[in-house]
Image (cartoon, helix red, strand yellow):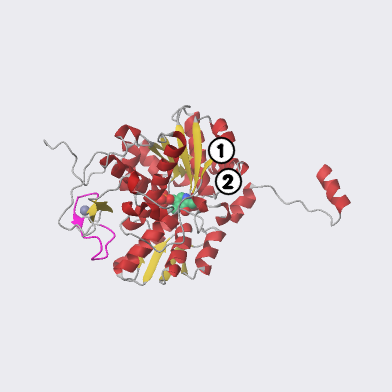
Amino acid sequence: MTDSHDPSHTLSLTADWESPAETAADGTWLECVACGETFAPFETIRYTCDACDGLLEVRSDDLPTFDDFSGTGVWRYAESLPLDSGVTIQEGNTPLYRVPRLEADVGVETLRIKHEGMNPTGSFKDRGMTVGVAVARELGVDRLACASTGNTSAALAAYGSRGGMETLVLLPAGKVAAGKVAQASLHGARILEVDGNFDRCLDIVQELASRGETYLLNSLNPFRLEGQKTIGLEILEGFQADYGTWPDRIVLPVGNAGNTAALYKVFRELVQTGELAVEDVPKLTGVQAEGAAPMVEAIENDADAVRRWDEVETRATAIRIGNPVNAPKALPGIRETGGTAVAVSDEAITAAQRDLAEEGIGVEPASAASVAGLRKLRAQGVVAADERVACLTTGHLLKDPDAAAAAGRDPEPVPADTAGVLEVLES
Ligand SMILES: *Cc1c(COP(=O)(O)O)cnc(C)c1O
Ligand SMILES: [Zn+2]
């Protein structure tokens, strides 16, 4: 080949996109990341490639620069999204906390915590739903569905309701944290508890969607991932504002690897517009629980694809996933940015949950995996002392009150008088 660029469907940092005949009036199209087949974005409902069943990506021939962004929250980045506006509950613009004690303890130059638990329903899933539910409305569908380890169902129920649509969620029975089921329930989703794990729920909901019964809003849906790109944009703008530089590394928990895929996509877009130099792209670093680590296995074995784990277990229920559907997008993202993937024990996850709590930041177990992973990689020397790092904490403490109570202090019974209380305090 004499062409100096990779074909546009390859997921390399330097591939340039060329708009095909199917490009919509607004400059967007869908492209298969496996074979390069292209499709018009808003005509027919499809989640994967008609030709090879590969994952689709939303592409645009009119990519924005940082100067094109204005306002706040996810829709600040409308120029980077497939629609101008969404079904919104004021998602995004989450805090990028400084954590001086934890930073010193972990031993990196800079550590910031991007707390996605501060979104309207308490997880980053809101960023994807504000876009995904708006696309559903554009497509004229009236019943939305997802399989979920919990947070996707809470976000779908809230955004679907706000958009006036019916919502259906499939959950693995007994494996979803209490706060999440409560949210899906109150926001009016029809909740189907499946006698099987998350991966089975997703198999079923994909089957329902392919039969035209529902519109699928799992992260297989390429529009949802567009919304999640805004996490990366906020982190980059935050580091520019505070340090005049980009972060060296972004560490995040990995379940279906949708966020990993979304962050990598926005980095590729910024490289194309010249906003970000290839050598400045933050190293994407994924963290999984030891009992559910197929991505880590694939990275360690330098494998082309992940092997589905049929048995998965971890107290970090949000990442209790054995078949990460976005792996074909995420594996190149980790490799091309010079990142890595690491597995951590449930004990290390709980310890990191306590570390964050000491800084006043309340997260659910899966979220703490990022900090546990950073600690492990720093101890191994994989992460250097002079690095500037952002850790993503994906969901709020109140999502999983049982895990929080188990990790925290026990209440102490006291008598109903001051003398009795003082006695206990002094003991
Ligand atoms: C969904 C979720 C994850 C996993 O994110 P992926 O994009 O599927 O890798 C991690 N943590 C929490 C709290 C989540 O809700
Ligand atoms: Zn294809």
Residue 171's disc is: none
| Image point (30%, 57%), residue name | 82
In the rendered structure, does residue 313 fall within the stretch colored magenta? no
Taking depth in this image into account, of 96 and 399 the one nearest to the observer is 96
Indicate the quadrant containing the C terminus: top left, top right, bottom left or bottom right.
Answer: top right
- Residue 276 visible within the image: yes
In the image, residue 383 lies at what x, y percent?
45, 30
Where does residue 231 sit, x and y in percent of width and height? 42, 48
Q: Tell me how many marks there are.
A: 2
| Residue 287 can be seen, yes or no | no
Q: Are marks 1 and 2 in contact (CB under 8 Å)?
A: yes
Quarter residue 202 falls in: bottom left
In the picture of the structure, the residue carrying the numbered disc 2 is 361
Q: Is residue 39 magenta?
A: yes
Q: Nearer the viewer, residue 63 or 203?
A: 63
Instruction: Give the residue number, with chain letter if any, for mark 1.
Output: 99
Q: Amino acid at mark 1?
A: Val
The answer to whether residue 246 is above or below residue 310 is above
> Is the N terminus in the top left, top right, bottom left or bottom right quadrant?
top left
Which percent across, then down, holds residue 372? Answer: 52, 39
Position of 410 relative to 200 (above/below): above
The magenta-colored residue range is: 33-48
> Which residue occupies 51% across, 56% down?
122
Residue 37, horizontal then vertical, whole percent: 18, 54
Name the kind of residue labelled 2 in the image: Ile
In the picture, measured across the screen, residue 84 lies left or right of residue 156, that is left
Most common SS among magenta residues: loop
Mark 1: secondary structure: loop
